[in-house]
Amino acid sequence: MFKIASLIEKIKQFGQDRRGNVLVMTGLAIVPLMGVVGVSVDYSRATNVRQALTSAIDAASLMAARDAQKLSDADLKKRIDGWIRDNLPPEAKSDFTGATVTIDRTARTIQIVANANVPTTIARVLGTQYMPVASNTQSTWGTNKIELALALDNTGSMSWDGKMTALKAASKSLLKIMKDAAIDPDQIKISIVPFNTQVRLARSFKDAEWIRYGMTRKVNCDWNGQNCTTETMTKTKWATTAQGCIADRDMNYDTTDAGTYSASAQQYPAFWCSQSTLAEIMPLTSDWAALEQRIDSMTPVGNTNVTIGAVWGWATLSPVAPLTEAKPATEPRLKKYMILLTDGDNTQNRFTSNGNDIDARTRLACANAKAAGINLYTIRVIDGDEALLKGCASDPSMYYNVQNAAQLDPIFKAIASEISAVRLTQ
């Protein structure tokens, strides 16, 4: 039987019950929670679009650098816009709103700032219709300023297995690539350092303060090496009959570049040429015909002293005496490189015929040149100390082990292309 008192009691209990508030509070909280989730989803989409935009403008920047010399500013900007759109994935094309392109033909730079608006989805409930994203990049066309030293083994063993013939052809291929890459007359300069146990200089240097005269040698000895006459090197002899050769400096200057030259130990010793046919050093120049002629004049003769090749390669890249054609390392966008090539083990320097001792001097010379900011490639042609040359290279990828002389041409071309390549600068 239904009782009025019982009904009144149930109504009181309903009024006191608070459990339904949880549902109400959850309903109120779900709106901002959905907004947070929506923002996270939209942020992730915007991040993906920005990454796609960055890849697209990097690709467009490199293509623009390639064609900058052929197109007007207006045409280049139009092409850049098209390249960016072509490189964007389908889902990002509609978000791309355009690019601002700044072309500086003096500095040879192209700067691209690209923008996109990514439509929001769930985040729209918070009033955000789009999420703007942007990316920028800069490239250069042509090449950086380049100074490159070719320190090339001209020892007798280079006459074997067609090595010297292949070296001359490969060197000319490199010269052609570098010549074609140069936009300004002095943008790329190259030096050539033929070496065996010595190097040979133009005798017009005879009055240079950094040359030391007074070295001696024994001559006119009898059959058992006795009763010799002592001959002294003079400036006149060096510039005439001695034919301009230079030996290693005193230790420890033999592995370094330059000096004050006030002390004789820092000066470069004038000496008699062991082989008068050794080609002369050609300091840095952009005279491509003269460089080819110097390559043609190289003759394989004599023993091996890799140290002196490395040191004089470095000397041609240094702006101070003995050779002063190079620019300071602080020159904007200047890169300095050396290719050090040999086909044999160290066998003789001014002090010793102990190969291990000479190797130690070579390692020091390479380390000092790299510390001076020179990017050093090394090439072993069939024979030579692999560990020494690999250690001399600035990076293991910059060491080449040539098993056949025919490999020299593609390797020189690859190095030349790498040095002269267009790269992104930012």
Image (cartoon, rainbow, N blue to C red):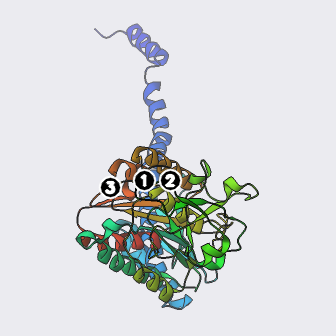
Report the number of numbered marks: 3
**Relative vertical location of residue 217 with respect to residue 235 in this rendering, above or below:** above
Q: Residue at x 50, y 53 (%)?
A: 366
Which image quadrant for residue 86? bottom left
Viewer-side residue, 154 vs 110? 154
Q: Position of residue 161 (x, y in %)?
A: 23, 70
Give residue 384's quadrant in the image.
bottom left
Residue under label 1, please give it: 395
Q: CA distance from mark 3 to mark 1?
A: 18 Å
User: Is disc 1 surrounded by few (<14), some (14 to 19) or many (20+) residues within 10 Å?
Assistant: few
Q: Residues within 10 Å of mark 2 (few under 14, many from 20)?
A: many
**What's the amino acid at mark 3?**
Gly
Residue at x-position 58% and y-position 69%: 316
User: Which one is in front in this view, the residue at disc 1 or the one at disc 2?
Assistant: 2
Residue at image mark 3: 384
Quarter of the image for residue 320 reads: bottom right
Mark earlier in primary sequence (1, 2): 2
Q: Is residue 316 left or right of residue 207?
A: left
Q: Which residue is mark 2?
A: 366
Q: Residue 123's spot in the image, x, y percent? A: 48, 52
Which kind of residue does numbered mark 2 sit on? Cys
Quarter occupied by the C terminus: bottom right
Q: Is residue 32 left or right of residue 203?
A: left
Give the number of the disc on residue 383: none
Identify which amino acid the numbered label 1 is placed on. Answer: Asp
Residue for point 44% across, 55% down: 225
Q: CA distance from mark 3 to mark 2?
A: 16 Å
